[in-house]
Amino acid sequence: MKNKELNLNAIKKLIPHRKPMLMIDKVTSIIPFVSAIGVKNVKNNEYFFKGHFPKRPIMPGIFIIEALAQTASVLVMHSLSLKYDKKFVYFMSIESAKFRKPVFPNCKLNLNVKRKQHRRLVWKFSGEAKVNNFKVANATFSAMIIK
């Protein structure tokens, strides 16, 4: 299996997300049908910090899960050699999400996703988000490919 790195332009060819909802900046490792590692550089001017929370800004947990899901979407689309103008990957479920530590501005969020199962159009993943090698969140989630 071949390991590959994807920059932002390559990611934008695979998934339709754009700012402000594009939650990954690059994929540093992708092994087709197996795993991917995404990176989100959490900047201090992210739009959500204005209201979550103004005196102590924290990245919303659901956006951490969204970043994991986008990394998984890149893995699926890259593995199947698809572009987002033909098919989309949609969230189906989130299971056992846990938020362990807050994510603050000016940190690097590492997003590790692994395929647990793949049957036809449905994919299931485990995901783990880390900052400085400390786990900040993890979840199991599934998605489906839609035309």
Image (cartoon, rainbow, N blue to C red):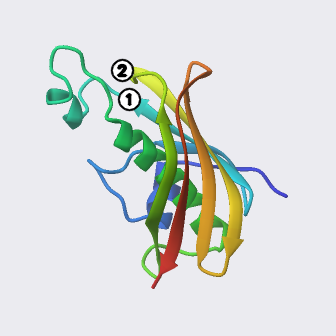
Q: Which mark is residue 42?
A: 1
Q: What's the amino acid at mark 1? A: Val
Q: What's the amino acid at mark 2? A: Phe
For residue 55, what is the image quadrant? top left
Label 1's element? strand
Label 2's element? loop
- Residue 138 % position (x, y): 55, 38
- Residue 91, relative to residue 25: is it above or below? below
- 70 or 142, which lies in front? 142
| 3D distance between C-alphas at marks 2 and 1 | 8 Å
- Residue 70 % position (x, y): 47, 54
Q: Which mark is residue 104?
A: 2
Q: How many marks?
A: 2
Residue at image position (46%, 42%) is 25
- Choose the circle earlier in sequence order: 2 or 1: 1
| Mark 2 vs 1: CB contact within 8 A | yes
- As drawn, the residue found furthest toward the bottom would be 147
- Residue 92, relative to residue 54: is it above or below? below
Residue at image position (52%, 67%) is 143
